Image (spheres, helix red, strand yellow):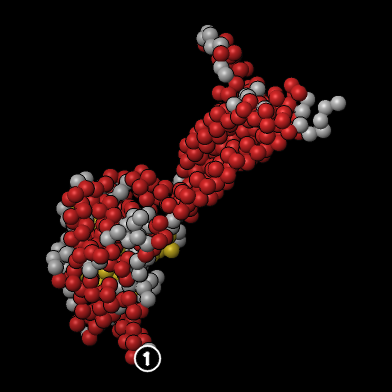
């Protein structure tokens, strides 16, 4: 008879599960970065009410928010190969689908998903900056781009920091869904280890603890950043 | 020197400016007075195109443009020849006092950092805030913020400085420190157009006072003439109201 709860097994497989961390971080960081880029331009189309583009942004945000992430992941996972095959047929190219690692599909899926949510967050952060700031920037002769990058965005980032941090933590945990597309991230490694010994609970406890610790480290980092950026409120340059 | 001719502006169906002519000669200070909603601020904001006039011509020094022909380049040029002091200060919240003054010198006027810094410190000194150079706006009082804003405007060395009710958002005890700075500036050769509700200040500082009512300039004259011998009944009513207000508010 085996043990009811195998502590040695639980500890023993930790190194294997840790191998998933690079995938988890890679997906989260890359998706957050491209999500911010997509979100910034998405927000601009809405703020400046750009014809046509803002409709496209609207449909995009609505679709991503209205469908589960797991469905989006599977659509990308099965959809991109079909698109590539169509492309090959149409233009006579010979792109080999099986040469593309699964994690690349996930980078696309998570970036697109993050972009939609961040469109709304970034839009709200930019609008939260006092309208007088852009007028002041114009009044000294800045172009719209100079005003945006030198005056508005730095303030918007500060306003939005807690929201963006929260979103990033959510994203970190959502990467666990990437295993459904065969990416061996933390959750994937846990499942592999669990399956080998048929000891699921132990493996999932490991996964939970690892996610938790990563999030704690990240929260510390954000607290530090918030403290640093609030120097503007203190009144004197740090 | 700036010259506005036949400026018209409507917001939707409300006509705010109904063909305004106004000239501010070089080195002159003109105060723009009138009731709230008479179009003073809108007129001021038409000069640097924060509002776009529907009709009329504006000349700033040797640069002039027509209402129908305002491109992005025209906007930039109009703004680079002028500076504005806002009612709610408009200091960049993410920049220190000194950076507020130097930012446009570096980014817009392409001066070197050390040159901008030298100019910035000089003008902060002039408004009496050299010791606040490294403070962020949130660490300054309203009066100090407005003085930094004035330093920022002066440092740009513009053809004209536009003041949009510079003391209206200040606590009463902070009004004088700002007015004193503007008064001091008006003695030098800076061209200024000031929208204000401070009648005593306007009388003291302005070479000419323009009275606006319902989107038109009814009178424009030297302070003594306008205050003591206004030509129009509407001007008299407005001034009576203000004088009364100051007589009875103890």
Rendered position, A74 above or below B85? above
Rendered position, A151 above or below A83? below
Kindly identify which residue carries mark 1. B250
Image quadrant holding the N terminus of chain B, namely bottom left
Q: Locate residue B42: give its quadrant.
A: bottom left
- The local secondary structure at tag 1 comes to loop
Residue plotted at (79% across, 34% down): A5
The answer to whether residue B143 is left or right of residue A108 is: left
Q: What subunit carries mark 1?
A: B
Taking the view exactly as shown, the residue that stands out farthest to the right is: A1
Residue A170 image position (x, y, % from top left): 61, 41
The answer to whether one can see residue A125 in this image is: no
Residue plotted at (67% across, 27% down): A13
Q: Locate residue B94: give its quadrant.
A: bottom left
Image quadrant holding the C terminus of chain B, namely bottom left
- Residue in front for this viewpoint, A65 or B2: A65
- Residue in front for this viewpoint, B235 or A138: A138
The answer to whether residue A182 is left or right of residue B129 is: right
Counting other residues with Cα less than 10 Å from the Cα at mark 1, is it few (<14), some (14-19), or many (20 or more)? few
């Amino acid at each position: 008879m085996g043990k009811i709860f195998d502590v040695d097994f639980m500890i023993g497989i930790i190194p294997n599960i840790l191998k998933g961390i690079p995938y988890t971080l890679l997906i989260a960081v890359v998706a957050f970065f491209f999500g911010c880029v997509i979100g910034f331009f998405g927000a601009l189309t809405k703020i400046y009410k750009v014809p046509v583009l803002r409709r496209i942004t609207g449909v995009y945000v609505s679709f991503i928010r209205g469908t589960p992430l797991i469905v989006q992941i599977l659509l990308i996972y099965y959809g991109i190969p079909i698109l590539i095959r169509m492309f090959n047929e149409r233009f006579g190219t010979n792109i080999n689908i099986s040469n593309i690692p699964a994690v690349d599909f996930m980078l696309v899926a998570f970036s697109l998903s993050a972009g939609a949510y961040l469109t709304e967050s970034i839009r709200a952060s930019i609008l939260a900056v006092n309208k007088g700031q852009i007028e002041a920037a114009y009044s000294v002769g800045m172009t719209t781009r100079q005003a945006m990058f030198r005056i508005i965005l730095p303030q918007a980032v500060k306003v939005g920091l807690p929201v963006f941090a929260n979103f990033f933590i959510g994203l970190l945990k959502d990467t666990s869904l990437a295993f459904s597309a065969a990416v061996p991230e933390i959750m994937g490694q846990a499942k592999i280890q669990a399956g080998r010994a048929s000891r699921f609970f132990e493996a999932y406890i490991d996964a939970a603890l690892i996610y938790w610790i990563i999030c704690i480290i990240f929260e510390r980092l954000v607290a530090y950043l918030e403290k640093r950026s609030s120097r503007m409120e203190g009144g004197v340059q740090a | 020197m700036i010259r506005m001719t036949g400026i018209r502006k409507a917001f939707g169906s409300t006509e705010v400016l109904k063909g305004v002519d106004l000239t501010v000669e070089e080195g002159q200070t003109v105060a723009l007075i009138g009731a709230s909603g008479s179009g003073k601020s809108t007129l001021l904001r038409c000069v640097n195109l924060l509002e776009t006039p529907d009709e009329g011509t504006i000349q700033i020094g040797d640069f002039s443009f027509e209402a129908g022909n305002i491109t992005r380049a025209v906007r930039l040029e109009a703004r680079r020849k002028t500076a504005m002091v806002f009612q709610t200060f408009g200091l960049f919240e993410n920049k220190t006092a000194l950076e507020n003054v130097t930012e446009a010198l570096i980014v817009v006027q392409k001066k070197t950092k050390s040159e901008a810094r030298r100019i910035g410190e000089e003008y902060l000194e002039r408004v009496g805030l050299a010791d606040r150079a490294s403070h962020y706006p949130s660490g300054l009082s309203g009066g100090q913020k407005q003085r930094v804003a004035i330093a920022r405007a002066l440092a740009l060395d513009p053809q004209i400085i536009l003041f949009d009710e510079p003391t209206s958002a200040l606590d009463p005890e902070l009004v004088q420190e700002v007015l004193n700075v503007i008064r001091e500036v008006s003695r030098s050769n800076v061209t200024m157009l000031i929208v204000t509700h401070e009648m005593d200040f306007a009388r003291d500082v302005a070479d000419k006072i323009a009275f606006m009512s319902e989107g038109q300039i009814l009178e424009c004259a030297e302070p003594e003439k306008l205050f003591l011998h206004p030509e129009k009944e509407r001007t008299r009513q407005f001034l009576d109201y203000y004088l009364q207000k100051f007589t009875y508010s103890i």
